[in-house]
Image (spheres, rainbow, N blue to C red):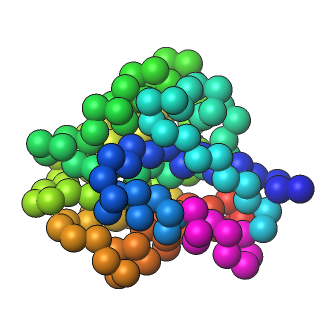
């Protein structure tokens, strides 16, 4: 039985971002991470209960017009006050895909996570343009890194 739970909150409206989610899930199943169970929930369905039950959080979103997706912002709006005091120091990581820029999306996510006092376990992964094998590998490594931070 797993000792830790990692919550993957995602908004995957495109095939490219969906392939990043699949790579993250695959990486979380690798050898050495057997003590980590994964709960994967779309951003519009993720609740404060999901966050409160998690030991770590990975976020995956497209960058839309220089900001995180509306679905991920909705997630933060729903969980902010119920999780504000209860989830301090939870490790998190984020993967953002954009066609031309991810800066604003990453900055806004880091600002909200900072207000929640979450601990960034991995640098944000910013993917611009087409999603290929290298980008999928980066996303997987980010998720595995967040999971591994629980085992330290």
Horizontal side of 6 relative to 10 (left or right) equals right
100 and 150: which one is in front? 100
Instruction: Quadrant for the N terminus, please.
Output: bottom right
- At a point 65% along the width and 46% down the height, the residue shown is 39
x, y percentage for residue 45?
51, 29
Residue 106 within the segment the image draws in magenta: no
Give the residues drawn in magenta, as a range. 25-33
The image quarter in which residue 125 lies: bottom left
- As drawn, the residue found furthest toward the right would be 1
Q: Is residue 71 above or below residue 41?
A: above
Horizontal side of 12 relative to 146 (left or right) equals left
x, y percentage for residue 54?
66, 41
x, y percentage for residue 38?
67, 53
Instruction: Quadrant for the C terminus, please.
Output: bottom right
- As drawn, the residue found furthest toward the bottom would be 134
46 and 53: which one is in front? 46
Work out whether residue 84 can be spotted.
Answer: no
Work out whether residue 142 can be spotted.
Answer: yes
Horizontal side of 70 relative to 20 (left or right) equals left
- At a point 60% along the width and 34% down the height, the residue shown is 51
The image quarter in which residue 36 lies: bottom right
């Amino acid at each position: 039985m797993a000792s830790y739970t990692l919550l993957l909150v995602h908004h995957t409206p495109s095939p490219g971002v969906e392939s990043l989610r699949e790579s993250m899930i695959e990486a979380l199943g690798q050898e050495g991470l057997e003590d980590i169970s994964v709960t994967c929930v779309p951003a519009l369905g993720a609740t404060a209960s999901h966050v409160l039950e998690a030991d770590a959080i990975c976020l995956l979103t497209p960058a839309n017009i220089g900001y995180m997706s509306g679905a991920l912002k909705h997630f933060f709006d729903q969980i902010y006050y119920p999780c504000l005091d209860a989830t301090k120091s939870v490790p998190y990581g984020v993967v953002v895909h954009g066609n031309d820029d991810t800066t604003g999306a990453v900055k806004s996510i880091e600002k909200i996570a900072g207000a929640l006092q979450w601990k960034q376990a991995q640098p944000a992964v910013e993917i611009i343009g087409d999603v290929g094998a290298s980008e999928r590998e980066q996303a997987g490594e980010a998720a595995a890194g967040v999971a591994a931070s629980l085992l330290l």
